[in-house]
């Protein structure tokens, strides 16, 4: 069974969100998503300074099985990316909620309102 930490928020597209401060979040793909993808071999990240829009593609994850979009969980401006996952994409498989994060985004708090709680996300992933 996939891990779904209670201290994070989630999207239906299998991204997680951690609020770092009033204006900044960090996000990545969930344990459920990385398990479904299999061995991740390549990651395309958004660029620092990019404006991203909630629900739109902002990168890609390539595994031995397929290529999948990374969807922006919030709207805002990318202020940091995790270079480690570009050089060692398997980090997402090993630690999706820690060292496998994708990007940090400067965001308006109002754009966090559509995110799911851990229980709501767990209900989606166990219903399939």
Image (tube, helix red, strand yellow):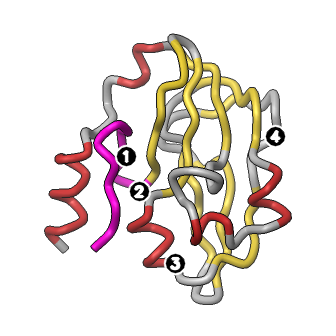
Q: Where is residue 43 in the image (x, y as percent from the top left)?
A: 73, 64
Query: Of helix, strand and loop, which mostly describes the magenta segment?
Result: loop
**Badge 4 or badge 2: first in the primary sequence:** 2
Q: Name the residue under label 2.
A: 14
Rounded to the nearest whole Å, what is the CA distance between mark 4 and mark 2?
21 Å
Occupied quadrant, residue 94: bottom right
Secondary element under disc 3, as helix, strand or loop, is: helix
- Among all residues in the image, which is located at the extreme bottom? 64
Identity of the residue drawn at 43% across and 64% down: 31
Q: Name the residue under label 4.
A: 47
Q: Are marks 2 and 1 in contact (CB under 8 Å)?
A: yes
Q: Give the left or right position of residue 43, taking residue 32 as reference.
A: right
The answer to whether residue 33 is above or below residue 57 is: below
Q: Mark 1 points at which residue?
A: 11
Identity of the residue drawn at 47% across and 34% down: 18
Secondary element under disc 2, as helix, strand or loop, is: loop
Identity of the residue drawn at 61% across and 24% down: 76
- Packing grade of label 1 (10 A; few <14, some 14-19, many >=20) is many
Task: Please report the bounds of the magenta region as a residue range.
Answer: 1-14
State the mark number for residue 37: 3
Secondary element under disc 4, as helix, strand or loop, is: loop
Please identify the quadrant where the C terminus is shown: bottom left
Q: Where is residue 56 in the image (x, y as percent from the top left)?
A: 55, 44
**Badge 3 or badge 2: first in the primary sequence:** 2
**Badge 4 or badge 1: first in the primary sequence:** 1
The answer to whether residue 36 is above or below residue 86 is: below
Q: Do the residues labelled 4 and 1 touch (CB within 8 Å)?
A: no
């Amino acid at each position: 069974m996939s891990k779904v930490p209670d201290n994070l928020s989630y999207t239906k597209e299998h991204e997680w969100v951690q609020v770092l401060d009033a204006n900044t979040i960090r996000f990545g793909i969930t344990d459920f998503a990385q398990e479904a993808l299999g061995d991740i071999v390549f990651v395309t990240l958004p660029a620092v300074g990019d404006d991203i829009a909630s629900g739109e593609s902002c990168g890609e994850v390539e595994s031995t099985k397929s290529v999948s979009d990374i969807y922006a969980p919030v709207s805002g401006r990318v202020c940091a990316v995790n270079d480690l996952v570009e050089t060692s994409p398997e980090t997402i498989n090993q630690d999706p909620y820690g060292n496998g994060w994708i990007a940090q985004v400067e965001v308006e708090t109002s754009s966090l309102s559509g995110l799911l709680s851990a229980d709501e996300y767990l209900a989606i992933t166990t219903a399939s």
